Amino acid sequence: MKYTNMKRFCTGLVLVALIACICVPAGAAAQQYFVNDGRQTISGALGDCYVTGRSGMTQLGTDAPYVMTASGLTQLGEAQPTVQRQPQSLSVTGTVPVAHDTVRVGLYYYYSDARDTSLTSANLQNYAGRGYAFGYYDDSRNFCQLGTTGETKLTMAIDKNVDLSGGHVGCYHIRLSGSYADFDSASAAAAAYTDGFPAYYNGTYYVLLGSYDTSADADAAASTRGVNGSAYSASNRCIVVTRTSDARILFEFDCGTDRSLAVRPLNSGGKAETWFKGYRYYGDFEYLRYNGGKLTVVNVLPLEDYIKGVIPYEMNGSWPLEALKAQAMCARTYVAANFDAYSRYGFDVTCDTYSQAYRGTVSATETSNRAVDETANKFITYNGSLVTALYFSSDGGGTEDSENVFYNAYPYLRGTADPYEQAAASINSYSQWTRTWSKADIAGRLARSGRSIPDVERIEVQYSDFGNAVGMTFVSASGKTVSVTQSSCYTFACYSSGLGLPSIHFTMQDNGSSVTFTGGGWGHNVGMSQFGAYAMADAYGYRYDQILSFYYEGVGLAEGIFSE
């Protein structure tokens, strides 16, 4: 909604600033500006006027009409958010079913050819404690132990001919005849050989020797050594466990597609922590080879420990406690509502922005851990069910209805004008931003997105009630039009393949051969603004439940009841 007349804008509007004309140049054209429904007027150039707000005196500096509203200094003619919820107090009532109390997080994984971070090998170091247990997880997410090792530094690798930091490992071995009842008896038999190791293949224990690049090499070695065995190489699902220092094989695991190798760090007291790829983690690790490819590495850990590894990477761990508690509620509810979302690939959620950021314990603070502890086992619900608790960095002044950004309409993901976020502007580098594109470049980006248009003469933007762009129409000089609406508008406006704008909360200025987009916020604008949560807690003193009630319409809070 736009306004072009100041008297019309001010009718019925309570201004929170006093506008005072303090200098009218001699000979200035007489022009009246109406303030507070016309009961007071000022004359002269508006650029010579000042407003007094919470931050002090500010010169308007232009003849374009301005007003000071509850959400800040606003130039007339900009799209103004008009629909605003009020924060409500929420209490925890009732229970909600939750599928699991452990989380499987894909740290390095295969999802598609476009998203593949899987590894040839992966090192693991026990940070607190000594040694590891080998095993697997059953269908109820219970760890089933097979055996142990006292080594503290392991390297897991695909069972191919590979070069590791400690040396070369071949995928062929000499498998001795016979099988064994358990890990200990297989280990004892393997200890009779300098290069012997136990293996667990499809529920049976074996002893193998050495590593060779070809079957012929393994058979020749068996003959030379005079052992009762033959060349063997497991399936393309096999994982080999080696000692990092010298690549000596300690264990092999191959249960096809039925089970994945699990490695549990051992510690005599307290929680074990493990170094992996420069980060420190609680919990266990699973290794699998999707479709027989490289290693998918999965961290398996208790739900609350997982949330402690999310919070400091999604929100600064030094932020106000109530903001961190709101973030903890969102992160916990998000994963609970998305258990098994990636089950086909061996995990529940990813460690990155495709789900939510997670990097273990290194950056956790006393305050961020406290936020998790004080909200433990509490979830956000709507009509008794878990919500999809979407969140983002900042909205620039208004969140948005979910169907205008994504595909589905959720009753709790309704947009609202956000008067609070501005109080965090000083720490938010995306509070205000400007991007300029040539019209020729815009036409080219439209064409690359499959929307052919010969040129762009002008752009028409459709705004929601919350000040967000939910539709854009591009018009050529010949009158041909191309339109993007709702999710397509968000994708084209914000993805790097389109305009690459930080958010859909923007206004537009036509410069002739180019267009300037001026806006605020960063992210998709659906759900909770993280900088808004900061501002609500820091500047306005709201509790986490009030923050959640503002950003998620009609929600409640409940205790989780776990199925497993």
Image (cartoon, rainbow, N blue to C red):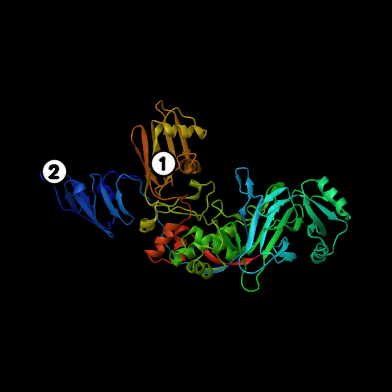
329 up-or-down from 349: above or below: below
What type is the residue that disc 1 sits on? Answer: Gln
Of residues 408 and 47, the one drawn nearer to the viewer in this rendering? 47
- Identified at 54% across, 46% down, the residue is 407
Where's the C terminus, which quadrant? bottom right
Q: As drawn, is 150 to the left or to the right of 228?
A: left
Three-letter amino acid code of the residue under disc 2: Ala
Q: Which residue is mark 1?
A: 462
Q: Residue 474's spot in the image, x, y percent?
A: 43, 34
Q: Secondary structure at mark 1?
A: strand
What residue did someone put label 2 on?
Answer: 28
**Could you say which is closer to the camera, residue 270 or residue 491?**
270
Q: Position of residue 85 (x, y in %)?
A: 41, 58
Q: Which percent across, then down, holds residue 479?
A: 41, 27
From where the camera sits, is residue 98 visible?
A: no
* Numbered circle sitting on residue 161: none
Q: Quick one: which residue is furthest to the bottom in this view?
A: 269
Question: Which quadrant holds the N terminus?
Answer: top left
Residue beneath the point at 79% across and 54% down: 210
Name above or below for residue 156 compared with residue 77: below
Residue 116 visible in the snapshot: yes
Instruction: Check disc 2 and report its element: helix, strand or loop.
Output: loop
